[in-house]
């Protein structure tokens, strides 16, 4: 079955973003793109809610500064009309330590006129926080609970 | 038109969790199911990876022992022939408290012969931990 234009758009977006081509990724998006990542913004202040290409460009530039190299696998993608869901496994190499961060993402895209108008992003944010901070927060919480 | 396997599985899962009725759920799970809901397994033992029907039923029993589903709102659903992905907002309470917990659950499912054969689930687990603790995680000195 031939790939739909919407799916091609999302796959082009992912390929551009994870290869560091921010302008190429933005070209797949509407001007008023609405982005929301469900994640703790006190640890990941560049995430949270963003609207418009300028704000999103700033967020993505921050991410690409912090991580020297990115790659991704796309084990699952589904679409229904203007909605596309993708499960993405990403590997980021930290710029300051060379450590690899591995994250599974669930991205839900809404497209309008063949471009991405909305992104909702989910992740195991507790694990992401632990990997970013390089701390075992779970053990810390369990120790505090047992005190 | 035949009903999608996701709906049959979802009804059986809700019934299993809320009413502790697992017989129907068994019929909707493939014997060799590959299941993972990512999250801190030392804090929530029902999270993590499982393989096989009995292991997944045990997860559902643990869920049933710990939570009750009060409401579920579908925010996004995509259905394929034998695939489904959805984003669902659940309102839950713990069995041992009336404290409400709200979580969005993103999942990707594959079915084989009408039975769930693979599931990957993602939750904003940092928020879940904070709701379960009833307070923000104190990160002063860490972050």
Image (tube, rainbow, N blue to C red):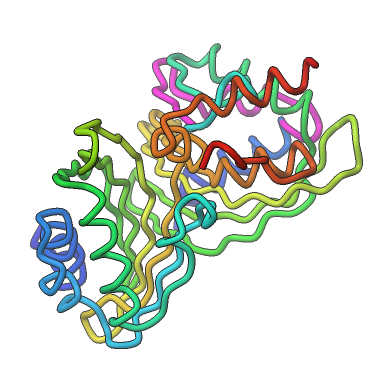
Q: Nearer the viewer, residue B125 or A67?
A: A67
Q: Is residue A71 visible?
A: yes
Q: Residue at x 54, y 52 (%)?
A: A40
Is residue A102 one of those drawn in magenta?
A: no
Q: Position of residue A104 (x, y in %)?
A: 35, 40
Outermost residue on the front side: it is B141
Q: Nearer the viewer, residue B85 or A140?
A: A140
For the image, the number of numbered tags is: 0
Q: Quadrant of the N terminus of chain A?
A: bottom left
Q: Is residue A42 above or below residue A53?
A: above
Q: Position of residue B28 (x, y in %)?
A: 53, 30
Q: Quadrant of residue B44?
A: top right
In this rendering, position of residue A45 left or right of residue A24: right
Q: Nearer the viewer, residue A146 or A75?
A: A146
Q: Quadrant of the C terminus of chain A?
A: top right
Is residue B20 one of those drawn in magenta?
A: yes
Q: Residue at x 35, y 32 (%)?
A: B112
Q: Residue at x 78, y 23 (%)?
A: B65
Q: Residue at x 15, y 43 (%)?
A: A71
In this rendering, position of residue B70 left or right of residue B12: right
Q: Position of residue B83 (x, y in %)?
A: 35, 45
Q: Is residue B118 above or below residue A79?
A: above
Q: Is residue A88 above or below residue A23?
A: above
Q: Is residue B61 visible?
A: no
Q: Quadrant of residue B130?
A: top right
Q: Which residues are magenta?
A: B17-37
Q: Quadrant of residue A22?
A: bottom left
Q: Is residue B14 above or below residue B65?
A: below
Q: Position of residue A98 (x, y in %)?
A: 19, 33
């Amino acid at each position: 079955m031939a790939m739909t234009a919407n799916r091609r758009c999302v796959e082009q977006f992912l390929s551009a973003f994870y290869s560091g081509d921010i302008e190429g990724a933005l070209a797949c998006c509407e001007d008023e793109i609405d982005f929301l990542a469900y994640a703790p913004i006190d640890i990941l202040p560049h995430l949270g809610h963003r609207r418009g290409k300028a704000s999103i460009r700033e967020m993505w530039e921050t991410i690409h500064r912090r991580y020297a190299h990115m790659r991704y696998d796309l084990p699952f993608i589904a679409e229904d009309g203007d909605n596309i869901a993708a499960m993405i496994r990403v590997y980021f190499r930290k710029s300051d330590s060379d450590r690899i961060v591995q994250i599974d993402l669930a991205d839900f895209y809404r497209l309008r006129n063949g471009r991405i108008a909305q992104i909702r992003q989910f992740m195991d944010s507790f694990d992401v926080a632990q990997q970013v901070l390089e701390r075992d927060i779970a053990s810390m919480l369990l120790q505090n609970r047992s005190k | 038109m035949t009903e999608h396997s996701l709906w049959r599985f979802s009804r059986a899962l809700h019934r299993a969790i809320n009413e502790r009725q697992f017989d129907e759920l068994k019929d909707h799970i493939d014997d060799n199911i590959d299941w993972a809901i990512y999250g801190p397994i030392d804090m929530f033992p029902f999270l993590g990876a499982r393989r096989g029907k009995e292991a997944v039923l045990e997860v559902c029993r643990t869920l049933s022992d710990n939570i009750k589903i009060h409401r579920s709102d579908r925010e996004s659903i995509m259905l394929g022939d034998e695939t489904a992905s959805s984003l669902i907002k659940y309102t839950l309470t713990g069995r041992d408290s009336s404290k409400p917990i709200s979580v969005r659950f993103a999942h990707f499912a594959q079915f084989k012969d009408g039975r769930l054969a693979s599931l990957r689930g993602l939750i904003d687990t940092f928020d879940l931990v904070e709701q379960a603790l009833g307070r923000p995680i104190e990160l002063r000195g860490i972050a």
